[in-house]
Amino acid sequence: MCPAESARNSAIRLSKSVVDRQTWLVFAAAVFLVAVPVFIEAPLVRSLPLLSLAMTAGWVWLSFSLMSRTSSYLWGDLLLGFSWSWLAGSIYWGWLRWEPLLHLPVEAIGVPFAIVCLRLGWGKIGNFFYLGSLLGTVLTDVYFYLVDLIPHWRQIMQVEPALVSPILQSAVAQVQTPWGQAWALMLAIVLLMVGIFPLRYKQLHWWAFSGAVLSTILVDSLFWLAAAAA
């Protein structure tokens, strides 16, 4: 093999290694941005909703700042998609959490922006992350409706924290019925299929989407364990 061909093959292997590393980093970041902030934003927005809402501007500023540099562009892109999720969470859980019917409309607040951006071919990573996160939210809410957990949702949002435990125990009992378990299994399978299939493509926006979708299973499982332990 001539030196030029050897160098070219080495460059190809290095490029492939960098791409593989980036895809996994984007996937891990997507999981982090769905799972961890849920446990940070949730208590913050209940006590300081205006601060949580104002932080959206900070996330947007940081995302554009990162996108202004080539080396950090993809992280700014991802963070911009996260900003839509943070904005929706701040609005709903800060002022509208007593009405479950408003949850999905508020969570979908960034959909028009995402559609326009994707049609223009801009911000794919962040917008796919946001849409993946929204899809996970939709399926979780569908489960609440199918298993008739919405009344428990309303009760939890209206009572004092000391009175939440009995309501959670009642909700867990409903989840543990054959009907609740069957639908939990079916929706988990859907999430796994939708989340795993895009991983066959070595494109960063698909891995951001998959990370957001699959992390829904993690978040829902953690909430279920917390409710069961209440």
Image (cartoon, rainbow, N blue to C red):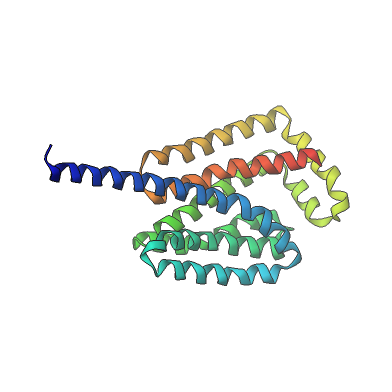
Residue 206 in picture, x, y percent from top left: 41, 47
Q: Nearer the viewer, residue 101 or 42?
A: 42
Residue 163 shown left or right of residue 33 in the figure: right
Check the image and report above or below for 83 versus 180: below
Instruction: Farthest residue to the front: give it.
Output: 3
- Image point 42% across, 62% down: which residue? 72
Check the image and report above or below for 176 versus 64: above
Residue 155 in picture, x, y percent from top left: 80, 51
Instruction: Farthest residue to the top: give it.
Output: 178
Residue 13 shown left or right of residue 39 in the figure: left
- Image point 73% across, 31% down: which residue? 176
Instruction: Farthest residue to the left: give it.
Output: 2
Residue 177 in picture, x, y percent from top left: 73, 29
Quarter of the figure with residue 55: bottom right
The quadrant the N terminus occupies is top left
Quarter of the figure with residue 42: bottom right
The quadrant the C terminus occupies is top right
- Image point 75% across, 49% down: which residue? 153
Q: Nearer the viewer, residue 18 or 61?
A: 18
Residue 182 in picture, x, y percent from top left: 64, 29
Residue 207 shown left or right of residue 167 in the figure: left
- Image point 62% across, 55% down: which residue? 37
- Marks counted in the figure total 0
